[in-house]
Amino acid sequence: MSARSGGAPPTAPGPRPSPSDDLEQRISRFTAGFGQRGGYRTPTDRERRAFTGAVTHLLDGDPEAARAGLTEIDFTLRTVTDAASGRRYAEVADAASESGHTTRGWGRVYVDLDGPARWSVQVPHPVADARTELLGARVLRGATGGVLVLAGAHRDAGEDGAADVAHREDSVFHAVVDELTRRNLPGVQLHGFADESFRGRDAVVSTGRGDSAVADAEQLTAALRRDGLDVCTAYSAPCKLAGRENEQGRTAADRRSRFLHVELNKTVRGDDARLHRAAASITTLTERWSRP
């Protein structure tokens, strides 16, 4: 199987499995320490290449090469078994801390170990866009073949917007998404907005700068509307919060790769049952993406 179609199925990454753990709770513990000031450092070019190269090895089914590359930058690779779904994920995490209290803030990557990578869910603003990190975990466990790319700091944590990874090209977050886009894996990026920012709307579905994912956007919109959400369709009509300046969306548009930018208002994200239903709606899409 070619790299562009997802690479070889990754094997379990060596002898460091963790006990069974609820993936959502694990991510909640990680993001609990995120603050609006401090906790982020822009990676050097070498660090960014080492991180992305390791993830590339992991996607290609070579966990030992991935681990060796991560060791260079003091990151770890372990297997996490999600207690809720029973699925196994490779977790790329900062070795310095599991509580969110790091000085680098480069985030985590989770890769489904039960088959080749076929799609991604991206969370660039955990905590700042409240509970999008939980939504990301629910989307990941909803279908096989997923990769979760999770930012490692509050969007305001860095100087001069350095930690706002949705609008930067110099982060490991962007570098990993760029590699997934190079492989032509479709991706959905999750955001949140205050209710007053777009009154009367529950969600915005956009294809960003590109138009390769219009059919996907239509499918997702239909699923969200079946759940009763009022959706603004930025791929077919003027909408606020359309994500046109999103850097990962720009990269996807340049490569004609499918990319969705999804915004949910605070009311939807704040209600656990509604957040769960939103994840289920997104899963109707990722289930299709997971098929060969």
Image: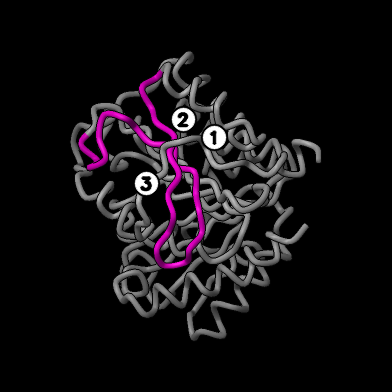
Residue 237: x and y in percent read 62, 67
Q: Secondary structure at mark 3?
A: loop
Say what secondary structure mark 1 lies in: helix
Residues in magenta, as a range:
73-101
Residue 242 on image: x %, y %: 52, 56
Left or right side of 102 for 198: right
Q: Is residue 222 above or below residue 78?
A: below
Amino acid type shown at disc 3: Ser
- 2 up-or-down from 31: above or below: above
Task: Choose between 289 and 154: the one closer to the eye.
Answer: 289
Residue at the image point whose x is 50% and y is 35% from the top: 14
Is residue 80 rendered magenta in the image?
Answer: yes
Q: Which residue is mark 2?
A: 172
Q: Badge 3: how crowded within 10 Å, few (<14), some, or many (20+)?
A: few
What label does residue 18 carry, if any? 3
Q: Which amino acid type is shown beneath numbered disc 1?
A: Val
Q: The disc labelled 2 sits on which kind of residue?
A: Val
- Please tell me whether residue 241 is drawn above or below residue 37 in the rendered image: below
Question: Which mark is on residue 176?
Answer: 1
Frontmost residue, 94 versus 158:
94
Q: Give the side of residue 222 with respect to residue 109, left or right.
A: right
